[in-house]
Structure formats: structure tokens, C-alpha cells
Amino acid sequence: MRMFLAAGAASLMIMASASLAFAGEAPAPTSQTCQQHQTNNTVAGAAVGAVVGGVVGNNVAASGHHGAGTALGAVVGGVTGGVIGHNVSNCDAAHDTPEVIDTGKQDEPPPPAPAPTNYPPK
């Protein structure tokens, strides 16, 4: 029974990490840089990994050591989930610019050029 629960929790972790890859592709309501997007994925991956790792650690731990198994599983799962979430976004820090988000509205025309201030001498 314990191995069945551990296998179920492991498959849940795999599905959760796969969903992070697709969650990162949805357009955000505001402009985000790639680095901000990568940080959000890292935090989300660590959170999901810690929960799933804690469940797996509790189920795999020997009798009387469930607390330690939960703690160790949460730490290992959190680190693993954070690494997976971080690697979902491939950012180049030298060219980090805000993502372009299509709002469906037309672009506004540029402002008119200012009037010249250097008139020819009389």
C-alpha cells in the first residue's frame, strides 16, 4: 500500500512539473521580463515540489520516522521542484526585455514632432 501511495505521489509530481511548463506560456495581464517569469516558475516549482516531496517522504519513511521522512522529502522535493521550475524558462540576462503582450488594441501613433526652436537668423 505504501509503495502504491509513493508511486501515486511521484506521478503527481511529474504531472505538476509538466503543468508548470505550460503555465509559463499563458500571457500575463502585465508586462514581465524573462527573469521575473523565471523567478515565478522557480517559486511555484519549489512549492509544488515541497508538498509532493513531503507526501512521498511520509509514505516511504520507516515506521516511527514519518516526521523525519516528511521533512526530508519536503526539502528534496522543494529543491528539485525549484530547479525544474527555473529551467522551464530559458532567459538570456544580457537581452532581458519585457515580453510583448498582444492586447488586441491598435498601437497608438507616435506623438507629433516638436516645433523647431532654432530659426534662421534675420
Image: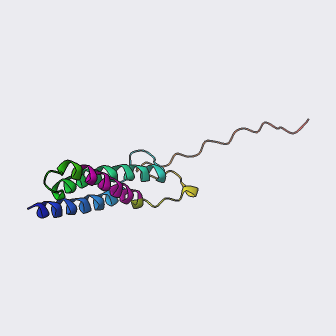
Where residue 15 sits in the image (x, y, percent)?
24, 61
Residue at 42% from the left image edge and 44% from the top image edge: 30
Apparent side of residue 37 relative to residue 63 in the rendered image (left or right) = right
Residue that sits furthest to the left in the current view: 1
Which residue is more in the foreground, 12 or 19?
12
Where residue 5 sits in the image (x, y, percent)?
13, 60
Q: Is residue 83 magenta?
A: yes
Residue that sits furthest to the front in the current view: 64
Where residue 122 sits in the image (x, y, percent)?
91, 35
Which region is colored magenta?
A: 71-86
Residue at 24% from the left image edge and 50% from the top image edge: 51
Q: Quadrant of residue 95?
A: bottom right
Where is the N terminus found, in terms of image quarters? bottom left
Q: Quadrant of residue 52?
A: bottom left
Which residue is more in the foreground, 60 or 51?
60
The relative height of residue 96 versus residue 119 in the rendered view (above or below) is below
Would residue 13 be seen by someone viewing this image from the given angle?
Answer: yes
Apparent side of residue 48 relative to residue 86 in the rendered image (left or right) = left
Q: How many marks?
A: 0
Residue at 64% from the left image edge and 42% from the top image edge: 112
Q: Is residue 63 magenta?
A: no
Q: Main secondary structure of the magenta part?
A: helix
Where residue 23 sits in the image (x, y, percent)?
32, 55
Which residue is more in the foreground, 99 or 102?
99
The way the protein has been coloured in the rendering is rainbow
Would residue 102 be seen by someone viewing this image from the given angle?
Answer: no
